[in-house]
């Protein structure tokens, strides 16, 4: 969708969106159109339940064309998150209406209006994402008609400048959504790595390690997961050097299981197709790198993703196999379906060993247990560092990506001890997200660290205000915000 900003005036074509505060007070533009159309707007409001409550909408056809009334509710609550929700709501209300163009006329005049305008546009852009490249018989009347969104606001040049930054982040989110949406016959370790290589155009340095290089590094756990697959495992290292040479980097590490059958501990058939999104952590890291490069973040950021496919095969891992990791620690494989932690064990160790980052954040669709804990609304995370933990929570709050800290601790950690190796890869069922995090902590070597288990939030089974149903890109925005507020500002 094309997005533009203009000074306040009367839109010449397309639908017009005007805001209405709770109680039904019309904006000057709405009042003018109402007057020209013989009071049609006032009549429509009187004859409907529309009162200007937050996010209510009402469509009225006037002599000026289609007018969408959008409820602001209490204008004091009209903050940036509110603006994003409204932008998404306006897009959803008009996407398939037949209108090609829409203009939102923002007439409220306080000093945050430019930022609000930018975030209205961002909300609409995020909501307009679609993944329909494989739907060859999709009819025109099932496709959105909306092509252009203009936001009219006083200070439109400033709004445009602010939006340009947000647009780079929206591109990062769309990149993640594309990766997560692709089927595993198209997106496997090598083709995923290739899409990362394309980030070179934005100035990201990209290095791809294959099985030979990883064997040399001793990554027995990551390689163990991939050994049952016909596809070669890959480790992709992306670097954005936007900071000063002397700035210590920060690192993001992603689980990239391009398809998770469970391996020999095979999953049941029902719902197994969902496991194409088991590369969601790697997808977020890649989209984040794209966002940071796109907005030229002033920070040195490393993105490392471990790409494998977990398949049952004559050469696959067996339960009871013992793997030696790059760290030297050994792992008894209890369940080949607990593969994500094996991938991350080597990816995390490699990252801290090679880059000595100021902090390291991993993302993974790691456990069904996390979905049992927090459902699909909130991302659970674990941390060994209170300050970093608080910063992530704040970043998530700022962009409407809810985060909830979960506990670590010795009592959980010791449940991962093995009788025959240094640890086992699967513990008891209860507390499964926590023991998985404890397992990962054994590979961070005291680096300030966060583990985000995005199993419940990587995919949305319903439309949300700024996320159409499907791959969500959850965490790209929060982590971009964390880099802005916690890394670039300090
Ligand atoms: N990728 C799955 C976790 C998952 C399941 C994510 C459902 C999203 C939806 C992971 O590899 C897995 O299979 N975990 C097991 C671990 C268990 C065997 C210890 C699980 O959660 O059941
Ligand atoms: Mn699994
Ligand atoms: Zn998995």
Image: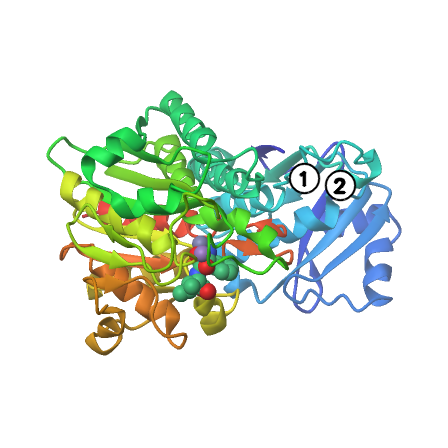
Where is residue 136 drawn, in percent x and y? 76, 31
The answer to whether any part of residue 286 appears in the image is yes
Question: Along the line of sight, which residue is nearer the eye, 226 or 414?
Answer: 226
Report the front residue among 452 and 320. 320
What residue did someone put label 1 on? 103
Outermost residue toward the front? 314
Count every numbered label the image shows and give the total.
2
Is 438 drawn above or below residue 329 in the view shown? below
Q: Quadrant of ligand 2?
A: bottom left
**Residue in the image at 43% along x and 57% along y:** 337
Q: Position of residue 393 (x, y in %)?
A: 34, 63
Pick whichever of labels 2 and 1 is earlier in the sequence. Answer: 2
Structural crowding at the residue carrying mark 2, measured as other residues with C-alpha within 10 Å and reported as few (<14), some (14–19) or many (≥20): many
Check residue 217 in the rendering and tell me which mark sits there, or answer none. none
| Residue 248 visible here | no
Q: Is residue 120 left or right of residue 45?
A: left
């Amino acid at each position: 969708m094309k997005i533009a900003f203009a000074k306040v005036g009367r839109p010449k074509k397309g639908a017009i969106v005007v805001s209405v505060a709770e109680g039904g007070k019309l904006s000057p533009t709405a009042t003018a159109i109402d007057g020209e159309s013989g009071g049609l707007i006032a009549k429509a409001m009187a004859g409907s339940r529309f009162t200007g409550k937050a996010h209510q909408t009402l469509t009225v056809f006037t002599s000026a064309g289609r007018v969408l009334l959008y409820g602001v509710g209490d204008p004091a609550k009209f903050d940036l998150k509110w603006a994003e929700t409204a932008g998404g709501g306006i897009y959803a209300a008009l996407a398939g209406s037949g209108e090609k163009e829409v203009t939102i006329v923002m007439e409220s005049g306080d000093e945050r209006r430019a930022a609000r305008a930018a975030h209205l546009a961002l909300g609409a852009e995020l909501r307009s994402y679609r993944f329909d490249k494989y739907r060859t018989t999709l009819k025109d009347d099932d496709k959105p008609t909306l092509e252009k969104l203009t936001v009219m606001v006083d200070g439109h040049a400033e709004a445009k400048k602010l939006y340009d930054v947000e647009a780079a982040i929206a591109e990062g989110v769309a990149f993640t959504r594309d990766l997560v949406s692709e089927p595993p016959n198209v997106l496997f370790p090598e083709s995923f790595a290739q899409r990362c290589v394309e980030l070179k155009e934005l100035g990201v340095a990209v290095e791809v390690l294959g099985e030979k290089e990883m064997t040399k590094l001793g990554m027995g756990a990551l390689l163990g997961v991939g050994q049952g697959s016909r596809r070669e495992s890959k480790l992709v290292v992306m670097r954005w050097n936007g900071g000063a040479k002397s700035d210590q980097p920060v690192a993001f590490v992603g689980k990239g299981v391009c398809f998770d059958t469970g391996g020999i501990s095979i999953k049941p058939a029902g719902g197994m197709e969902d496991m194409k999104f088991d590369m969601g952590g790697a997808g977020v890291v890649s989209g984040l790198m794209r966002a940071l490069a796109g907005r030229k973040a002033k920070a040195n950021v490393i993105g490392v993703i471990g790409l494998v496919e977990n398949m049952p095969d004559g050469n696959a891992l067996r339960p009871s196999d013992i793997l030696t990791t790059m760290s030297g620690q050994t792992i008894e494989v209890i369940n080949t379906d607990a593969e994500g932690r094996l991938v991350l064990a080597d990816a995390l160790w490699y990252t801290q060993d090679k880059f000595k980052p100021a902090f390291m954040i991993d993302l993974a669709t790691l456990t069904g247990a996390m979905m049992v804990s927090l459902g699909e609304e909130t991302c659970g995370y674990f941390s060994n560092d209170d300050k970093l933990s608080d910063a992530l929570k704040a970043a998530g709050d700022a962009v409407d990506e809810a985060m909830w800290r979960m506990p670590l601790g010795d009592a959980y950690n010791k449940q991962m001890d093995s009788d025959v190796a240094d640890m086992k890869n699967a513990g008891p069922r209860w507390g499964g997200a926590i023991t998985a995090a404890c397992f990962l902590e054994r590979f961070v070597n005291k680096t300030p660290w966060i583990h985000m288990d995005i199993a419940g939030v990587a995919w949305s089974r319903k439309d949300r205000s700024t996320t159409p149903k499907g791959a969500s890109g959850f965490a790209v925005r929060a982590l971009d915000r964390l880099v802005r507020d916690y890394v670039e500002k300090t």
